[in-house]
Amino acid sequence: MIAGRCLCGAVQYRSPGPPLFSIVCHCRDCQRATGSGGVPVLGVPRSSFAWSGPVRQWRMPGGSGQAAVRNFCGQCGSMLFGTPESAPEMVTIYAGSLDDPESFAPTDALFVTHRPAWARLHAPLLEHAGLPSG
């Protein structure tokens, strides 16, 4: 089970898992949204994802031209999950909100050409200049 919550506990989510993918995204949008060098994220099927609590959304054009939607707690502001319009069958969960952060096992790093030198991880990840093809 993949489960998590916001900082104040007002929003909780769960998905039966396993994740579809686990990556670290270093695009400038993710950096600015999190105030860090990148965001660790995992994908799950939208059909099996459920949440409860006061979620608010921030929408902006993504690299696909469709909206990238970031969902966050309406009380404490914690970023929790994304619902990208370019992939309506999927939800992306921000790994820092997981109840068990040790369960996150990234395999790839995206947009590494934008990654600051100080944000390099000590994990053997496949590195991509942008989105992986195929």
Image: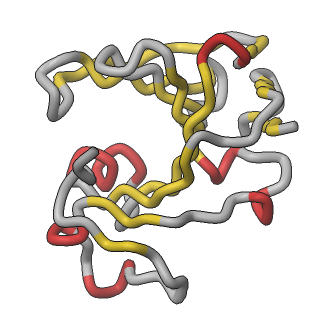
Q: Is residue 39 above or below residue 48?
A: below
Q: Could you tell me which residue is drawn at 61 percent across and 23 percent down?
A: 45
Q: Is residue 22 left or right of residue 104?
A: left
Q: Is residue 87 left or right of residue 10?
A: left
Q: Is residue 82 above or below residue 112?
A: above
Q: Is residue 77 left or right of residue 98?
A: left
Q: Quadrant of residue 75?
A: top right
Q: Position of residue 9 (x, y in %)?
A: 83, 31
Q: Could you tell me which residue is drawn at 55 percent across and 53 percent down?
A: 22
Q: How is the image coloured?
A: secondary structure
Q: Quadrant of residue 31?
A: bottom left
Q: Quadrant of residue 66?
A: top left
Q: Could you tell me which residue is drawn at 79 percent across and 22 percent down?
A: 10
The foreground one among 104 and 4 is: 104
Of all residues, the one furthest to the front in this rendering is: 134
Quadrant the N terminus occupies: top right
Q: Position of residue 111 (x, y in %)?
A: 23, 61
